[in-house]
Amino acid sequence: MAQLNPEPRHDNYDIVIVGGAMIGASIAWYISVHPDFDGRVLVVERDPSYEFASTSHTNSCMRQQFSNEINVKVSQYAAEFIRDFRNQMGGDPDVPQIALHSFGYMYMASEPASVRVLQENHKLQQACGAGTRLLTPEQLAEAFPFYDLSDILIGSYNPVDEGYFDGGTVFDWWRRAARRGGVEFVSNEVVAMRCEQNHVVGVTLKSGTELSVGAVVNASGPRATATAAMARLALPVEPRKRYTYVFEAEQPLDCDLPLTVDPSGVHIRTDGAYYMAGSPPQDGDPAVAYDDFVEDHALWEDKVWPAIATRIPQFEAIKVRNSWVGHYAYNTLDQNAVLGPHDEVSNFYFANGFSGHGFQQAPAMGRGMAELICSGGFQTLDLSAFSYGRIVRGEPFLEKAVI
């Protein structure tokens, strides 16, 4: 993508999207191709290198094993979109085909309460057409003999449209195609908003430039709460650390490793010739500063490596090749997205709080937001369960299957 200009070309825009990472790019592209829209769209990105964006630290995973029907359907659309990416992008022969590596997710339960959750989720997922299967320890041992199953009561496995994909290429082409469709991207930062009578009428950029706006979309990831506060709005989203490790095994498996969600909270999967592991912090899961990407080097030795070697004894001898820290935009109310307009400030739209699911949910959420803004309502998937109203009412729409 070409270098971004720091200043916008106009002084008024129909839509200003705050944040140009995966979610902002998705919304921008879907708006640009929506038949009911012919206005001006500006995407303001504070760091066009995306060095510290959640988008840059993602593991690019996709699954349908959720506890809410709409989350299953959101991911099913994502799989459909990825499989047909070139056609979805208008059939441009320059657009590459995107591979979806469907080696599956494997949730493991070692306690009766966790078994019940997997069983309840399985019923819902099957009703949605997902390929999830519940496996006994005996079935697991036969299909995946490398696991130590001494403490496992049941496994939940779906090898259909679950795995990982090249999300970086999707992100790149959304930005390219949006710009070709007339969307303007600038390297700047929204630092203030002007509101009149429950309406956002303008934004101020860090450079001092003031713009008139018809609507604002908050797509600023872990910084979403700060963006909402500019319009004097509250949002229960905070940055939380997630740790990723890429490692090499002295004795690699002779098959792909499903993304295995261990009862310890550690997850591991195949990553090309290597393996990838992820984990939340070791002690609690506190909110952190927006710029806190400091690694906890004891986490690997004290928690992650022991969990890996216990679950897969063949991985006793492994070597870390790379590691990093990313941030979840964590919705503290219910770990689900907040999507749509504020109840009172109706031209302020939220696309926030994806709690680690943003990459796989970006296609459906971008399409839904474009429908909402351009046509006044959801036309394909009904995403109203994610509306801001539940925040005001304090009524969680809880997603149980959060890694």
Image (spheres, rainbow, N blue to C red):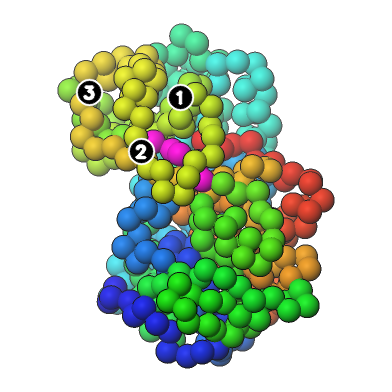
Separation (CA) of disc 1 from disc 3: 20 Å
Among numbered discs 2 and 3, the one appearing first in the sequence: 2
Which numbered mark, 2 or 3, is in the foreground of this view? 2
Which residue occupies 48% across, 45% down? Answer: 289
Report the amino acid beneath label 1.
Gln
Residue 40 image position (x, y, % from top left): 52, 87
**Which quadrant would the N terminus be assigned to in this image?**
bottom left
Displayed quadrant of residue 322: top left
> On the rendered structure, is 58 left or right of 123?
left
Q: Are marks 1 and 2 in contact (CB under 8 Å)?
A: no
From what the image shows, is residue 111 above or below residue 361? above
Q: Nearer the viewer, residue 64 or 365?
A: 365
The residue positioned farthest toward the front in the image shown:
208
> Looking at the picture, how far across and down is residue 69, in whole percent?
67, 47
Q: Amino acid at mark 2?
A: Val
| Residue at mark 2 | 294
- Which residue occupies 66% across, 67% down? 231
- Is 231 placed above or below 100 here? below
Residue receiving disc 3: 318
User: Magenta includes 242?
Assistant: yes
Q: Callout 2: 10 Å neighbours few (<14), some, many (20+)?
A: few
- Check residue 282 in the rendering and tell me which mark sits there, or answer none: 1
Question: SS for tag 3?
Answer: strand
SS class, disc 1 = loop
Magenta segment, prevailing SS (helix, strand or loop): strand
The CA span between labels 2 and 3 is: 23 Å
Magenta span: 239-244
